[in-house]
Image (cartoon, helix red, strand yellow):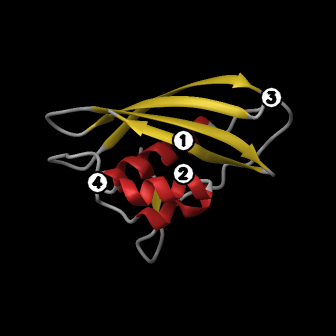
Amino acid sequence: MSPEIGIDGALALAPLTWGPPGAQPDERKLRHLTQALAEVLAGRRPPQILADRFTDRAYQALVRAGQMIHANRPPFTGSVHMKQPRDGAIEMCALVHCGDRNHVLALRLERHGSQWLCTEFETA
């Protein structure tokens, strides 16, 4: 399943809103976020689609990172695995299928007001 594409071709990402204490974002929304990040890191989408899902520091790191995933076909994000090391923080990873070589994405999300925002990301 991939994220929905809006009328103007933009990736439609639903906000990752904070629920009751201890609640985690919907896994489908997390998968959409990792899919969007994989597409940005593969150079298939502009980083601006993630600007409101990242902290300023993490977004600037994303812009500086440029293309980090070299793929001979569009990336496809598999299942998301997550842990909640403390209330208000989620650490997650996902396998990204890219044709001949797969990659792993790791993200840390933290509660900022009523939303979850990505504060760190890595790929290998």
Looking at marks 1 and 2 on the same chain, the residue that comes earlier in the sequence is marked by 2
Residue 62 pos. (x, y %):
44, 54
Neighbour class for label 4 at 10 Å: few (<14), some, many (≥20)?
Answer: some
Callout 4: SS: loop
Give the amino acid at mark 4. Answer: Gln
* Separation of marks 1 and 2 at Cα, in angstroms: 6 Å
* Circle 3 or circle 1, nearest the eye: 1
Amino acid type shown at disc 2:
Ala
Q: Which residue is mark 1?
A: 120
Write the residue at 43% across / 49% down: 37
Does 89 sit above or below residue 117?
Answer: above
Q: Are marks 1 and 2 in contact (CB under 8 Å)?
A: yes
CA gap between label 3 and label 4 equals: 35 Å
- Give the crowd class for mark 2: few <14, some 14-19, many >=20 residues within 10 Å: some
Q: Residue 78, image x and y in percent?
A: 39, 32
Indicate the secondary structure of the residue bearing disc 2: helix
Which label's residue is closer to the chain start, 4 or 1?
4
Residue hosting label 2 = 58
Answer left or right for 76 relative to 13. left
Q: Position of residue 30 (x, y in %)?
A: 56, 41
Extreme residue toward the right, this view: 20
Asked if residue 64 is positioned above or below residue 6 in the image, the reply reads above
